[in-house]
Amino acid sequence: MAGSAEARKLVYLVTGGCGFLGEHVVRMLLEREPRLRELRVFDLHLSPWLEELKTGTQNVVEACVQTGTRFLVYTSSMEVVGPNIKGHPFYRGNEDTPYE
């Protein structure tokens, strides 16, 4: 029955999670939802207290180190870069492309 207990775990996405109401919803879920498996917060900027909870990539890297994994291929999309402060999109660039 352990599999069924995991199936009941919940994943939440809170949009506007750093606004007044959204922050209260996030805190409530962290404090009061016993079936919480994963909490995703979507906002333009994370509150400082949420930055401290952002550990997903760090956990993956540490797991690789602990298990002796020799290679980690980390992928993402260009959309995570978003427009720069001037509103210009990142288009067909790579790690060496200058971008403000």
Image (spheres, grey):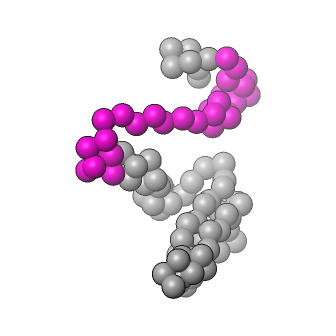
Q: Position of residue 94 (x, y in %)?
A: 56, 18
Numbered label tally: 0
Give the residue drawn at x 69%, y 30%.
83
Give the residue drawn at x 59%, y 22%.
100
Q: Which residue appears farthest toward the front when viewing the image?
A: 1
Query: Does 88 appear in magenta?
Result: yes
On screen, residue 95 versus residue 61, left or right, reads right
The picture quadrant where one finds residue 15 is bottom right
Report if residue 28 is visible in the image: no
Query: Does 27 appear in magenta?
Result: no
| Residue range highlighted in magenta | 63-92
The picture quadrant where one finds residue 52 is bottom left
Q: Position of residue 59 (x, y in %)?
A: 38, 53
On screen, residue 58 versus residue 81, left or right, reads left
Give the residue drawn at x 61%, y 50%.
45
Give the residue drawn at x 26%, y 50%.
66
Q: Position of residue 19 (x, y in %)?
A: 67, 63
- Most common SS among magenta residues: loop
From this view, report whether residue 94 is shown above or below residue 40: above
From this view, report whether residue 17 is shown above or below residue 1: above
Looking at the image, which is closer to me, 69 or 42?
69
Looking at the image, which is closer to me, 81 or 64?
64
Q: Position of residue 58 (x, y in %)?
A: 38, 49
Looking at the image, which is closer to me, 39 or 45?
39
Report if residue 68 is visible in the image: yes
On screen, residue 14 versus residue 69, left or right, reads right
